[in-house]
Every structure is written in C-alpha cells, then in structure tokens.
Image (cartoon, grey):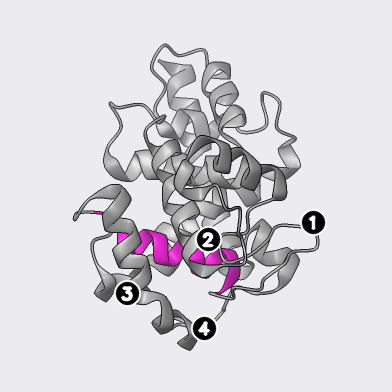
Amino acid sequence: MRQALKDLALAALLVALCALAACLAPAAHAQTTGLASAGAQAPQEAARYRRLLIRTAHAYWGLDAPVAVFAAQVHQESAWRADAVSRVGAQGMAQFMPATTRWIAGLHPHLAAQQPFNPAWALSALVTYDRWLYDRAPARYTPRERMHVALRAYNGGLGHWQAEAAATGAAQPTPAQVDAACGRARRAPVHCAENLGYPQRILVVLQPRYAAWGPGL
C-alpha cells in the first residue's frame, strides 16, 4: 500500500511537471519542425480540413468519434501543414515516419497508397492508428484514459508503454502507475517529459480549441 501511494504521488508530480513543460514547449514532432502554434486559437489553416477530418473520424470511429482530440493532435503534430517535415524525417500532417507509413499501409488496405503528404491520407492514417492503439489500451480504463495511452503510444511507441506497465509490478496497473514507471523499462528517462507531456498538451491545452468541431474526451 505504501509503495502504491508513493507511485501515485510520483505520477501526480510527473504529470504536473509535464503539463507545465507542455505549455512552454511543443512535443517531439512539433519541436523538431517548429510548427505547433503557441496561440490561443486554432490555426486558420485548420478550417480547410474540418469537414474532411470529421468525415474521416466518423468513418473509422463512428458518429461519437472524439473529433476534438484528433484535431488537437493534428494541431500539435504539424499545425495543419500538409507539407510538414521534421528534422528527424517525420512527414505530413500526421508526422508519420517512413517506417510507420509502410507498416500501416501493409496493415490497412485503404492506406496502401502511402501518401503522407496527402491530407486525406494523413488524416485517415492518424485516426486509424489512434484507433489501433486505443483498442490495445486496457479495456478497464475510461475512454479518456485509453486515449491517454494511445497518445503516449503514438508519440513514443506502444512497446515502451507496455514495458513500463509491466515494470510497475502490478497485475492491473492504473494509468498513473504506468506514468510513474516512465523510464524504468526500455525508454530512456530523458524522453519521459516529452512523452508524458504529449497527451497532456493535446487533451488539456489544445482540445478545448476544437470543442465546436465535435465530441472530445
């Protein structure tokens, strides 16, 4: 019990620190390209793709798709720039690395074209990959908690999250316990602030800017 309380306290501290970091600086892909907007409003470019994102989200998630989350994620990844390229090679609105583009194209026939710079392909890839990751988050978690897991995995890899869940030593670790275990498995601790800050920035900072687009979490 004492160890569990320590884990929860540590997780709360990490999330608080990462929330501050997220407000001060964008996460990985956006940092490398300098694309994420620091303003309080959605970029003007976003309006061009509103209907396309809503239509795509409904196609792969249903009418209750968390559209506001997806919009916030695109905002964070590329600031809605279809031609975005990060210094590490992530491409397009969804900032997919080439290896991820090839992988998801092989998994989903509708993405076989491998066109990361095509907005329709990129938005489809983003919501499809989010769905794939969301479905692999523990079903006992709330929808928001599962999206938190999916976003951490989108940013840093599902394998890292799963390894950290195992590192907690708990049979059914809570999201807070897994967050507290960041850096205790294969992930280098130096990457934890970015990875924990990524869902915090999307769900807390950016999502409200897209509340009029559709449901959120």
The residue labelled by disc 4 is 39
Quadrant in the rendering for residue 99? top right
Q: Residue at x 63, y 47 (%)?
A: 101
- Residues 167 and 8: in front is 167
**In whole angstroms, how far apart are the C-alphas of marks 3 and 2?**
14 Å
Callout 1: few (<14), some (14-19), or many (20+) C-alpha neighbours within 10 Å? few
In the rendered image, residue 135, in percent from the top left (x then y), is placed at 37, 33
Instruction: Give the quarter of the figure containing the C terminus.
Output: bottom left
User: x, y (%) of residue 112?
Assistant: 55, 47
Is label 4 or label 3 in front? Answer: 3
Residue at position x 72%, y 67% in the image: 85
**Residue drawn at 41 percent across, 11 percent down:** 171
Q: How far apart in space, not on screen, are marks 2 and 1 (Cα)?
A: 18 Å
Q: Secondary structure at mark 1?
A: loop
Q: Nearer the viewer, mark 1 or mark 3?
A: 3
Where does label 2 land, which residue? 122
Amino acid tagged 4: Gly
Asked if residue 217 shows in the view, the reply is no
Q: Position of residue 14 (x, y in %)?
A: 55, 44
